[in-house]
Amino acid sequence: MADTLTDKTSARTWRAPRLTLRRREAIEAWLFVSPTVAGFLLFFLGPLVAVVYFSLTEWNLLTQEATFVGVKNYVDALSQNPDFWHVLRNSFVFAIGLVPLNMSLALTLALALSRPFRGVVFFRTVFFAPVVTSAVAWAIVWRFLLQGEGGAVNQLLAIVGIGGPNWLREPDWAMVAVIVTRVIKMVGLNMILYIAALQAIPRDYEAAARLEGASNWQIFRMVIWPLLAPTTLVIFVITMIGSFKVFDHIYLMTGGGPENGTLVLAFYIYEQGFKFFNVGYASALAMIMFVIVLVLTVIQMTLRRKDMR
Amino acid sequence: MTLTTRHTRLVSHVCLIIALSVVAVPFVFPFLWMVSSGFKSATEIFGQPSLIPRVWRWQNYLELFEYQPFARQYFNSIYIALAVTGLTLVISSLAGYALARMRFAGAGLLMLFLLSALMVPEEVTIIPNFFLIRSMGLMDTHAPLILLPVFGSHGVMATFLMRQYFLAIPKELEEAGRMDGLSRLGIWWRIALPMSRPALAAVSIITFLFSWNLFLEPLVFISSLEKFTLPLALSNFTDSYGLPLWHLQLAATSLAVVPILIVYLIAQRQIIESFALSGVKG
């Protein structure tokens, strides 16, 4: 923006030759961005406008086509359909379980792995490996490992005398299982972001604090943690949004069950839209998801701005 | 004195290694168990657990190709991921270059619009996109699996990554190029792109993996077996009751995961850095 301003003033002094050059540059620039813009309009902005409209219509297998019904679908979701609040609760339980676990583990691992020692590369590689693995493969393998009888996890637990539950068949345990396995899958990414942030902190800070006689915990609490704040904020929002988007993981591990115990918002949208063909209702759900993600993003931006001051 | 400090340092190093090894178990164990179970028979899978199969059942790796057109599905995943990666590289670097280096009316607004796409989950737009793709007559084709990632939030992320990198290239180099009579396209191709190999590599890696692991879009758009991609195919090894055929499923999953893991182990530094650069995934 500032660039265009300075450019305008210089154009005023030069005028004739400059203007044609500028126009030429603008045309070329729009040609450069035209594939991106066309795709953006067709596959993103258009659909986004359409989903707003769809959400205001009654459109399902019975009606076959869209009829405008105003905010009926939102009213349905918020006050008529008991599934909705259950699903929203599940999504929040999933997020509230996943985010702190993911972030604290990521930070702990990053603190351990941000300094060189023998084996550091090996462990970084290990903790990041699930990130490059497909969520589908990860979910399939864990579903196999977490079977009630004969599952490897329970057989390992049996060795130390613990009778493990039928993880994916009991609603509460199923939620625990999908959260923990998702954390193992994704924690490497946050770990890497924390490592990068930790390595950017000048060593002198810590050395100075140590000279003052600060303990390890005091150094972390007073020096490192405050300096990590911007990274923590970004990671928090990314992880939070990611946890609301989770679909394939749950689709394959529990199918939303048992007793809808792991039916989360993204899955509910898919189920309503593509399994039951409640297009209007599913679009309203999609809009609600959009609003949740938007609110999270706005919170992040305002906090960030405050942080910079 | 020095001896004891060296001693405590060694002890703390060993403790750290032990602690990390314990934490590493649930990260490594699934991969080992996946590969080993892929070599077991359907009955041994539920017998006494052991990491090394009693009988190595290599037939699993033949049967899974008979169960569904797995080779074809594997090929689909490879060519789609390559197409998505190639297209993303061209389109995002063109747009990224214009946004970094060229002055044009509406650039600020365009950036803002594109940024907004980064935040919107694909679940939000998947329903209208379904009708769009259907009206284009592209249902049960690979076109949506290529178009949606290239132009969706992933493509936008790639555009911003490229723009960031282009901003850091010294302007003087481009001036020199212009003196030599290069067009804008020439500068992009002969100067900007060769200077941004690390960014291009990062975009390639994360884009290939993004496409390779894509699940929702294939699930929504693809219905015939021979058009499946790997994630769909893997979830499809079930008996007539819909229960998983574990020995085949885990063998197939190994076939899909192990090559990626091998490449990852060879190029782990480069791959991890690429993800750190993109920073917005997951």
Image (cartoon, grey):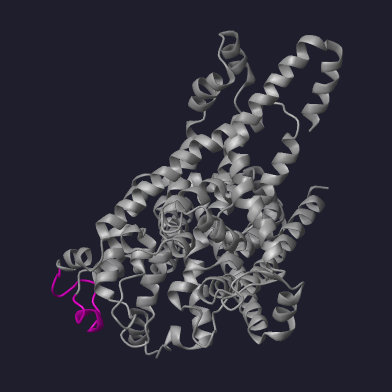
Q: Nearer the viewer, residue A269 or B257?
A: A269
Q: Is residue B45 visible?
A: yes
Residue A73 falls in which quadrant of the image?
A: bottom right
Q: Which residue is rendered at x = 69% and y = 19% of the image?
A: A24
Instruction: Indicate the position of residue B102 as horizontal and vertical percent values.
Output: 67, 26
Q: Which residues are magenta?
A: B41-57
Q: Nearer the viewer, residue A151 or A169?
A: A169
Q: Which residue is rendered at x = 71% and y = 63% of the image?
A: A53
Q: Quadrant of the C terminus of chain B?
A: bottom right
In the image, is A2 to the left or to the right of B236?
right
Q: Is residue B74 above or below residue A37?
A: below
Instruction: Indicate the position of residue A99 as horizontal and vertical percent values.
Output: 61, 68
Q: Is residue A215 visible?
A: no
**What is the total number of numbered labels drawn onto the structure image?**
0
Q: Which residue is rendered at x = 55% and y = 22% of the image?
A: B185
Instruction: Indicate the position of residue B203 as horizontal and vertical percent values.
Output: 49, 41
In the image, is B189 to the left or to the right of B61?
right
Examine the residues drawn in magenta and state their main secondary structure. Answer: loop
Is B56 inside the magenta-drawn segment? yes
